[in-house]
Image (tube, rainbow, N blue to C red):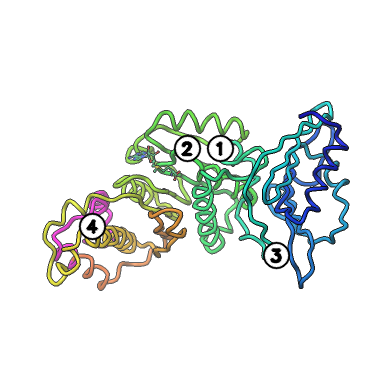
Amino acid sequence: MKLELSDAVAQLILRINDPLFVRAVLSGQRRSLQPEYVRVDIKPVMIKDELKFQIVGSDGKKDITKNTELDFDFQALFLSGYSNLQVDTTTESYSVRISKKDQAIAGLSKVKLTRELSHNRQKQRMLPESNQIFKALEMSDMLGRIKPTKMDKYKQVDEFLRLMNQLIDGQLSDQKDISIVDLGCGHAYLTFAVQEFLKNKFQKVSILGVDERVDSKEHNEKVAIKLKVQSSFIAAKISETPNQKVDIAIALHACDTATDDAISWAVKNNAKVIMAAPCCMHQLQTQIKDSPEPWALLTKYGLVKERLIDLMTDSLRAQILKLLGYKVDIVEFIGGEHTARNILIRAVKSDLPALEIDKERYIQMLNQWQIKPYLANLLAQELKTTAQI
Ligand SMILES: C[S@@+](CC[C@H](N)C(=O)[O-])C[C@H]1O[C@@H](n2cnc3c(N)ncnc32)[C@H](O)[C@@H]1O
């Protein structure tokens, strides 16, 4: 519905002052105007028993939060240059789009929301929802909010960046340039997020995404053009990826033994940091028929056997990396409610010699269970030269 801009703003303010007001979002840019932020979020908050408005402005990199009194001048804010204005109450969503000719086009839809007055800030994200990459990847809507169907992926990417940041601060912060290879990159949600996140930390970020699917490469190259970033993509098997300099090799949910291919490629290319969140795993599952006693106590239950062998697979991957001179930890990188595949193997090259106890444990484990992990086959030569196994 078209209406005068002043009438549309009056409707928005009416709803902001409604006791059922839940949230408002301002985004986009009107012609010839320069709003202060990329996106503004407004919500009611209760601070020391007093009702206020919390206004969070995001410039696409960081958020600035202000708590204001109820008589705040929303008219000035709404007219300061944003082209999409939306105010939600518990029952209605009222949205206004301001056209290039400064005409207001309003829409009203029914919603069912809860009013939440807690003033605790939401978890600080590594990249805000409004960041341009999420729009280019079609993960966020026109108001710069992550679409509900993409929320799990957004949280995975966010947590991955958080854990990567810890390693960078400890290991790579002295470097001017950094090179990242994302193995099994799919639609490159993580690849673009890593590039965006690192561009303020390093002078030059080189990034390569590898996926065997040609359509992934084509999709990712289109996104790179949209974002005007220089990322390279190749359609290739991970194991056939040409050798190159790599500081951080990442693999998020590369299927089955593709995670082993990724770890192996990273080791052979002397990656300083390896971050691999494995996906489904079948290789050891098929090797283990009988388990050494007393482990039959666990392996007689199909479900427990499957989980036990998944954990064995990851522990053996970690042990192989340790034997090859990496410092390794295994962390849960996201709550189990977002993905069941929530383990991350983090390895940092240290060139420490392999300890005898680590070698013995590894050999005994393989002998007792009569197994040969796929990664051990891929890195047989390295295990022989570096750890004499
Ligand atoms: C589950 S998706 C994950 C994609 C992406 N890392 C993410 O988390 O959004 C796994 C991707 O790995 C790719 N892939 C699986 N095995 C591969 C291999 N051996 N070489 C290259 N790509 C592989 C698949 O084509 C798929 O795009």
Q: Amino acid at mark 4?
A: Lys
- Please state the horizontal and vertical placement of residue 336, each as a whole percent of the image: 42, 59
- Residue type at tag 3: His
The secondary structure type at the circle numbered 1 is loop
Q: Indicate whether 22 appears above or below 136.
A: below
- Mark 2 packing: few (<14 Cα in 10 Å), some, or many (20+)? many
Ligand 1, image quadrant it occupies:
top left
Which residue bears the numbered disc 2?
A: 187
**Which numbered tag is attached to residue 119?**
3
The region drawn magenta spans 364-389
Within the image, what quadrant is residue 324 found in?
Answer: bottom left
Q: At 30% from the left edge and 47% from the top edge, which residue is drawn?
A: 256
Contact (Cβ within 8 Å) of mark 1 with mark 2: yes
Disc 1/disc 2 C-alpha distance (Å): 8 Å
Which image quadrant is residue 183 in?
top left
What's the amino acid at mark 2? His
Q: Nearer the viewer, residue 367 or 107?
A: 107
Marker disc for residue 190: none
Q: Residue at x 45, y 31 (%)?
A: 217
Give the Cα distance between marks 4 and 3.
Answer: 57 Å
